């Protein structure tokens, strides 16, 4: 990874193109958005698993109550 960083720093240091490339390399907003979307996806997966489990347990409870009536 160090070689890539060194190569990119040399590209950034070269003339007018370097300023646009420099801003692109230093921009971390896309990385942050990806991290937040991964966290949100993980929360959704956990919520679906919990809701499914609770739904199954609740269904069993209602079946038991209905059978005892």
Image (tube, helix red, strand yellow):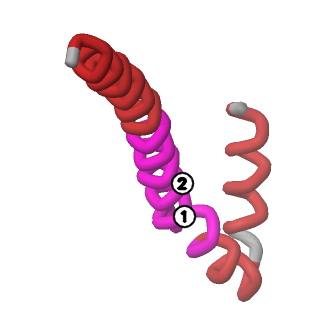
Q: Quadrant of the C terminus?
A: top left
Which of the two residues, 11 or 27, is positioned nearer the viewer here?
Answer: 27
Q: Main secondary structure of the magenta part?
A: helix
Q: Nearer the viewer, mark 2 or mark 1?
A: 2
Tag 2 secondary structure: helix
Residue 20 rendering spot, x and y as whole percentages? 66, 82
Q: Which residue occupies 69% across, 44% down?
A: 5
- The stretch of residues the image draws in magenta is 23-45
Tag 1 secondary structure: helix
Which of the two residues, 16 or 58, is positioned nearer the viewer here?
Answer: 58
Which of the two residues, 24 or 38, is positioned nearer the viewer here?
Answer: 38
Q: Is residue 18 magenta?
A: no
Residue 57 rendering spot, x and y as whole percentages? 33, 19
Which of the two residues, 22 or 10, is positioned nearer the viewer here?
Answer: 22
Using the image, determine if residue 50 lies above or below residue 23: above
Q: CA distance from mark 2 to mark 1?
A: 6 Å
The circle drawn on residue 38 is none
58 lies left or right of 2: left
Residue 29 rendering spot, x and y as whole percentages? 47, 66
Residue 24 rendering spot, x and y as whole percentages? 63, 71
Q: Quadrant of residue 64?
A: top left
The circle drawn on residue 30 is 1
Using the image, determine if residue 27 lies above or below residue 8: below
Residue marked by disc 2: 34
């Amino acid at each position: 990874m160090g070689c890539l960083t060194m190569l990119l720093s040399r590209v950034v240091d070269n003339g007018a193109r370097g300023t646009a490339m420099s801003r692109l390399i230093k921009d971390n907003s896309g990385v942050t958005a990806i991290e937040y979307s991964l966290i949100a996806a993980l929360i959704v997966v956990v919520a679906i698993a919990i809701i499914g489990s609770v739904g199954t347990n609740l269904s069993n409870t209602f079946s038991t109550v209905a059978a005892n009536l």
